[in-house]
Image (cartoon, rainbow, N blue to C red):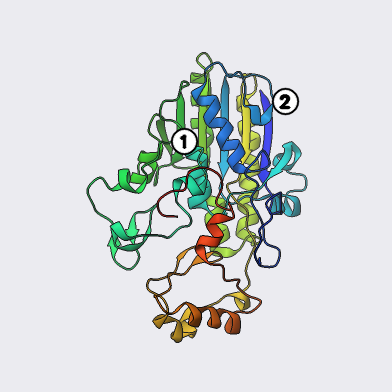
Amino acid sequence: MHLSGFLLVEADRMLHLPMPLPRDAVLPDFGDGGLFGLARDLRAWLHDPARASISFNAAAPAHSLVVLLVIDGLGDRFLQRHGQGSVILGHRQRSLTSVFPSTTASAVTTLLTGLSPAQHGLTGWFIHDRRFGGVIAPLPLYRRGAGHLRAPFLTQRLFPYPGMFVGSQRPVTMVSPQEIAFSPYSLRHARGARIRPYGSAAEFVRTIVDEARGMQASGGFIHAYYPHFDALCHEFGAHSEEALVEFERIDHLYADLLERLAGIPLTLLLTADHGFIDAPEERHVCLERHPETRAMLATPLFGERRIAFCNIRHGAENDFGGFVREQLAGRAVLVPSDRLARTGIFGPGKAHRRL
């Protein structure tokens, strides 16, 4: 078994933007130094049976079986700060930047498609799509403030692109938490793969091992997703006791997996989809404390808390710009969306209609 460790790092790489940026801004690398490069090469490997190995990791032996562990939220800064003596840090080979926005909805979709956020159009937990009533959450499929989404051919219209596993020339299994394994989003993006749900950390390991043993002869790809670290960091903070305990659990899980996969010829990759930077309460911006913005906004904010997209009412552009300059100086940077899109920060490829 060949081991390869990839953990995301919050660092500026290669992309330089001709516009003001927040302090300590993290910019994505859409080449071989980023998550998109890994997803791109995995897709190429799946669709080309003559390709002996993943070119992204040229030093790896040409194993026909690849296992990808996606640990949601486990960034490189956390690993360097809290992972001393851990098995995961001991196997760390390099850092990657996430995509932009560096959030689960955008990054996990890139890992399931091989497409950049520019191409798949999921630019945050909330997106704006007039066809479905405005601001919606595409992963759980609900409209902000109005309950679950229902519409003819909903997922086909929301996610019109091909997933990574459609047309794959190698067998694929997607190992996913049982509460989301058969959600509309998961079913749409897992087309071409076998879905194996799991309920516990022990079952997560057991399912991966079972699938790897079953693929020894044929080769193939196992995409295994673990979301619990991310959920705890959102609730308690990235350096909380809860997060530290969960990391220890993940490290034991990883060590157990290594032991049980020993002897099986495969390449094991571990990556996060993004990392975390805690935002203290005093750095939060609450628009409810600025009621004057209600007359300036045509819809609720969408995107993410740290990358908020603002749909400004026609004629209110100057007022909103003045509000940001006067009230949010040093806390937010205002950039026109067309200018942002032209920088290439959402990645390469033909832009999705939502951009």
Q: Position of residue 263 (x, y in %)?
A: 64, 19
Quarter of the figure that contains the N terminus: top right
Q: Residue at x 41, y 76 (%)?
A: 297
Q: Is residue 25 above or below residue 93?
A: below
For label 2, the residue is: 59
Q: Amino acid at mark 2?
A: Ala
Using the image as rendered, state which of residue 181 and residue 12 is in the foreground: 12
Q: Amino acid at mark 1?
A: Val
For label 1, count other residues whose C-alpha is less than 10 Å away and answer few (under 14), some (14-19) or many (20+).
Answer: many
For label 2, count other residues whose C-alpha is less than 10 Å away and answer few (under 14), some (14-19) or many (20+).
Answer: few
Using the image as rendered, state which of residue 112 and residue 129 is in the foreground: 129
Q: Is residue 143 above or below residue 179?
A: below
The picture quadrant where one finds residue 147 is bottom left
Q: Does residue 101 show up? A: no
Please give left or right for residue 141 compared with residue 346 in the image: left
Task: Tell me the element at label 2.
Answer: loop
Determine the CA span between mark 2 and mark 1. Answer: 26 Å
Residue 50 numbered mark, or none: none
Q: Position of residue 172 (x, y in %)?
A: 46, 27
Q: Residue at x 64, y 50 (%)?
A: 28
For label 1, the residue is: 175
Quarter of the figure that contains the C terminus: bottom left
